[in-house]
Image (cartoon, rainbow, N blue to C red):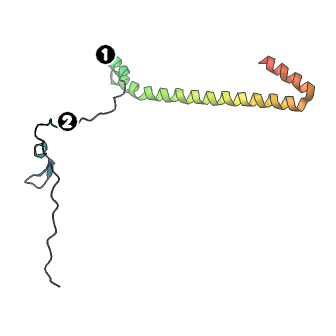
Amino acid sequence: MDSERLPVPVPAPAPGVVRLPDGRYVYDDSTAPVVQGSAPVVVQHIHQAPPDRTVQRLALGSGVGAGAVAAGVYFGPLLVGVLTAMAANLAILALLAAVMAWGVVTVVRSVGGSDGKAAAKRLRRGR
């Protein structure tokens, strides 16, 4: 075989990419192809809306310092999370209480005979 090595091909840069004299590559929109008679393509980035800054604006407007702003930023979402967790816990406890009361009434009715039915009736009236 021949001992000569073939040169490694160098890939051409993508359209719109220009190589600077120092060897770096940069994007250049002026080299992008433009179709005759058409409007230029507008690339628009749509981002999520920033969080509500009402507390911070009120604090800054009333002359309160950066501590109040930081507290509003930190404790606002924390308070919402704590209240949500409390509401979920109370809902689960209420569901458990209702299921347990239904179970007690069902057991008393089935086991107690006529006395059990009367006791269940009194229990239901007591609630």
The quarter holding residue 71 reads top left
Q: Position of residue 47 (x, y in %)?
A: 31, 33
Residues 17 and 104: in front is: 17
Point 29% across, 33% down: residue: 46
Q: How many residues crowd mark 1 within 10 Å: few (<14), some (14–19), many (20+)? A: few
Q: Please identify the quadrant where the N terminus is shown.
A: bottom left
Callout 1 amino acid: Gly
Where is 26 relative to 113, above or below?
below
Q: How many residues crowd mark 2 within 10 Å: few (<14), some (14–19), many (20+)? A: few
Q: Mark 2 points at which residue?
A: 42
Point 52% across, 29% down: residue: 82
Residue 16 visible (yes or no): yes
Q: Position of residue 10 (x, y in %)?
A: 15, 63
Instruction: Report helix, strand or loop for mark 1.
Output: helix
Q: Mark 1 points at which residue?
A: 61
Residues 74 and 46: in front is: 46
- Residue at the far top in the pictured view: 62
